[in-house]
Amino acid sequence: MSQTITLRRPDDWHLHLRDGAMLKAVLPETTAHFARAIIMPNLVPPVVTSDQAQAYRERILNALPQGADFEPLMTLYLTEDTDPADVAAAHASGLIYAVKLYPAGATTNSASGVANFDNVRAVLEKMAEIGLPLCVHGEVTDAEIDIFDREAVFIDRVLDPIRRATPGLRVVMEHITTRNAVDYASAQDDTLGATITTHHLVINRNHILAGGIKPHYYCLPVAKREEHRLALRAAATSGDNRFFLGTDSAPHTDANKLLPCGCAGCFTAPNTLSILAQVFEEDGALDRLERFTSLNGPAFYGLLPNDATITLEKSGASYPDHIATEDGPVTVFDPGFDLHWKVL
Ligand code: NCD
Ligand code: ZN
């Protein structure tokens, strides 16, 4: 008999669903396995007001595959013009679950992000007061800071000062990629959480750059040295309640990835759970997989874990190289090894 593992249904605490034809094509890949997801607001134009978040939520619900049981947890994109009262009302009505901070220019569609943090002080104070989490893309954007150092520098120069200036603010360090971030998060109280992606548990920077450039492994924050990947694996598999899954599944068409200046993002929604089961098994931590995928995240957000379950069977799994969309093919993240665990 093959081995199985049953988990409470997972949630994805950082997901890009896009819009239009892309939304329609990628949404079923998430709803097949996940019950809820924190939906990133970096559309073009970004989702900055509660009205826009409401309309985007409806577009997502309209795109759901038949019979899907999925709740999009909406976010607002923080700009220097964000109105604290709009944020508070969107939270009070149950529409939004977090506000997203992109330093201006840090990543895909982040041009409207924050350049001067003094201009968002009132919003952050309101969020601390009402307990609404700030999801942070933690990279500085200064041209003189090496791209591999941008997360570590952000923690010292931006994140820690914001948290000190705004006591009680709940913060999610998103898609952490360094030992520095693991160490920082591990030393904080329970107002801080950190998401870790599937791909950052699997690839280091050699996978992107050694033996030819691999655009499909390029994402932001960019994967770092092996020692950082190992620190992320130790954090994810530890069961520590500050660390939880945010896939950052970020679909781009192959045409937009395979360019002289290609887009950042790995599309991991289809095979994330197969990969994670294998990673946790390799590290002797299969019994802690559920904490990472299904328990720690809801606890941070003050939500109950899902009642429904999913079962994975160790009988071999295969995934297509890409999914088709009306905009063109989107390549599925290739972990570089055969997968054993299949979601039943
Ligand atoms: C994301 C995207 O494509 O929207 N890309 C990525 O590499 N992760 C943006 C982001 O989350 O940084
Ligand atoms: Zn992202």
Image (tube, grey):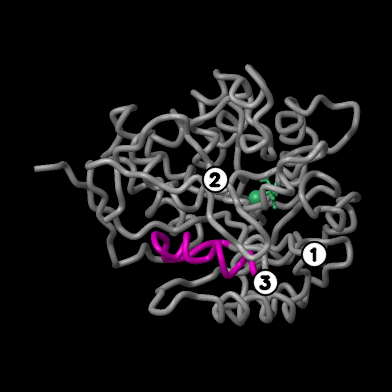
Q: Could you tell me the amino acid type at mark 1?
A: Val
Which residue is disc 3 drawn over?
Answer: 20
In magenta segment, residue 37: yes
Does residue 259 appear in this view? yes
Q: CA distance from mark 1 to mark 3?
A: 12 Å
- For residue 128, say whether it is visible: no
Q: Position of residue 162 (x, y in %)?
A: 76, 46
The percent position of residue 25, horizontal first and vertical second, equals 56, 65
For the residue pair 9 and 275, the one nearer the viewer reads as 275
Instruction: Depth check: give the residue in front, 30 or 155.
Output: 30
Q: How far apart are the alpha carbons under marks 2 and 1?
A: 24 Å
The local secondary structure at tag 2 comes to strand
| Magenta stretch encompasses residue 184 | no
Residue 38, horizontal then vertical, whole percent: 56, 61
Which residues fall within the magenta stretch? Answer: 21-38
Q: Are marks 2 and 1 in contact (CB under 8 Å)?
A: no
The answer to whether the residue labelled 2 contacts the one labelled 3, judged by CB atoms less than 8 Å apart, is: no
Query: How many residues crowd around disc 3 within 10 Å: few (fewer than 14), some, or many (20 or more)?
Result: few
The label nearer to you, 2 versus 1, is 1
Looking at the magenta stretch, what is its main secondary structure?
helix
In the rendered image, the quadrant that contains the N terminus is top left
Q: Which residue position holds label 1?
A: 44
Labels 2, 3: front one: 3
Q: Badge 1 local density, few (<14 within 10 Å), some, or many (20+)?
A: few
Q: CA distance from mark 2 to mark 3?
A: 27 Å
Name the residue at 88% across, 61% down.
80
Q: Which is in the foreground here, disc 1 or disc 3?
A: 3
Residue that mark 2 sits on: 195
Q: Residue at x 63, y 38 (%)?
A: 216
